[in-house]
Amino acid sequence: QVQLVESGGGLVQAGGSLRLSCAASGRTFSTNTMAWFRQAPGKEREFVGSISGSGRNTYYTDSMKGRFTISRDNAENALYLQMNSLKPEDTAIYYCAADLITGWGTGYPQFRYWGQGTLVTVSE
């Protein structure tokens, strides 16, 4: 059974940083694209960015570029999201996704597997 478990969320002040982790189990994703999404209260789910299986290629939503960095450790079957200069509007539940079905390089990629999410709250 494939599981994606996010961790690292919490409360942080504006301007601060957080690093989210996603631990995958049940199969390896070393050849598969993985990604982060987020969903703010009352809003639709939003694509944050994705990373290729090798880790050499990344793609970010324009608004995330420069502040967010996605990385992965295939030996650990793990995905990471480093978030810097956080703003109150970054408050959301952040989800890990794996195994791209379609949509690389777009703002609407589709993934086969999803985690349950971790809450990030950024205070003023």
Image (tube, rainbow, N blue to C red):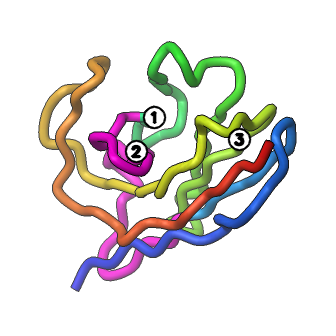
- Camera-side residue: 116 or 69? 116
Q: Residue 101: horizontal and vertical position, in percent?
A: 13, 42
Mark seen at residue 86: none
Please state if 51 lies on the left or on the right of 7 as rendered: left
The magenta span reads: 22-47
Residue 78 drawn in magenta: no
The residue lying at 86 percent from left, 36 percent from top is 15
| Real-space CA distance between mark 3 and mark 2, rounded to the nearest whole angstrom | 13 Å
Residue under numbered circle 2: 37
Please state if 102 lies on the left or on the right of 3 as rendered: left
Type of the residue with mark 3:
Met
Locate the N terminus by quadrant.
bottom left
Please state if 97 lies on the left or on the right of 80 as rendered: left
Q: Residue 6: horizontal and vertical position, in percent?
A: 51, 69
Secondary structure under tag 2 reads strand
Residue under numbered circle 1: 48
Mark seen at residue 83: 3
Quarter of the view holding residue 14: top right
Q: Residue 17: horizontal and vertical position, in percent?
A: 81, 46
